[in-house]
Amino acid sequence: MYYQMFKHVLLGPGLKAYYRPWVEGSENVPAHGGAILASNHLSFSDSVFLPLVLKRKVVFLGKSEYFTGKGVKGAATRAFMQGVGTIPVHRGGGKASEAALRTGMQVLGGGELLGIYPEGTRSPDGRLYRGKTGVARLAIEAGVPIIPVAMINTDVAQPVGKRVPTREDIGVRIGAPLHISGYRGRQEDREALRELTDAVMDAIRAMSGQEYVDRDSAQYKRELDKAQRKASSEES
């Protein structure tokens, strides 16, 4: 209910009129059945503009804390997350990656589109970072294709820390599906998972034009934060 209301009544029409987002390759998204949309992650608004340009619903996974906030702010956050197709992943009683895998399998088993950011977090500097192999494992276990996606200019419209996007030409490029027939039964094979994940990231890089960095984005962010805290303490 929230998804259709946000996309077709409350949020979608205004965003389309103001930002006029463009899309290339929408024919690569199947009309029916489960599939993974594996995208680069430049901005919080990626999860808004990707579903906006597609006819089918896109489901994203989000931490359960987004859905448990109190008061008006908590209710607004919960409604927004539901409105953009996000479902909670409960981390209690197991690792977050396993919880995400189980939830993702349920989404794909229901024949829906699952949006995933293989980098695991937003890029700290606009470059494309090494993908986590969970996207490959999930595709192999669910038996669904991975469709590479490149978000364009969302980081310019809404950089980290900016709540409301500014007017920019935002685009979405969707590549040809990567089928997993050659990887069936290899969901525990680390080399196979890395090979398939790297193929996904290479397809994203080719469409986005981003510089590729072969390292973990979250780790790099922690290093940046540590360096900034150290610099601040030395200045004070």
Image (cartoon, rainbow, N blue to C red):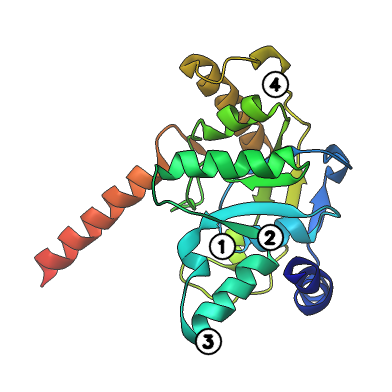
| Picture disc at residue 44 | 1
Residue 147 is drawn in which quadrant? Answer: top right
**Label 4 environment density (alpha carbons within 10 Å; few <14, some 14–19, many ≥20):** some
Element on which disc 4 rests: loop
* Residue shown at 66% from the left, 47% from the top: 115
Element on which disc 1 rests: loop
* Amino acid type at image mark 2: Gly
Element on which disc 2 rests: loop
* Amino acid type at image mark 3: Val
The first of marks 1 and 4 along the sequence is 1
| Picture disc at residue 72 | 3
* Amino acid type at image mark 4: Ile
The first of marks 2 and 3 along the sequence is 3
* Distance (Cα) linking label 4 and label 3: 44 Å
* Extreme residue toward the bottom, this view: 72
Residue underneath mark 4: 180
The first of marks 4 and 3 along the sequence is 3
* Distance (Cα) linking label 2 and label 4: 26 Å
Disc nearest the viewer among 1 and 4: 4
Q: Quadrant of the C terminus?
A: bottom left
Disc nearest the viewer among 4 and 3: 3
Residue underneath mark 2: 85
**Label 3 environment density (alpha carbons within 10 Å; few <14, some 14–19, many ≥20):** few
Q: Is residue 209 above or below residue 176?
A: below
The first of marks 1 and 2 along the sequence is 1
* Residue shown at 40% from the left, 35% from the top: 215
**Label 2 environment density (alpha carbons within 10 Å; few <14, some 14–19, many ≥20):** many
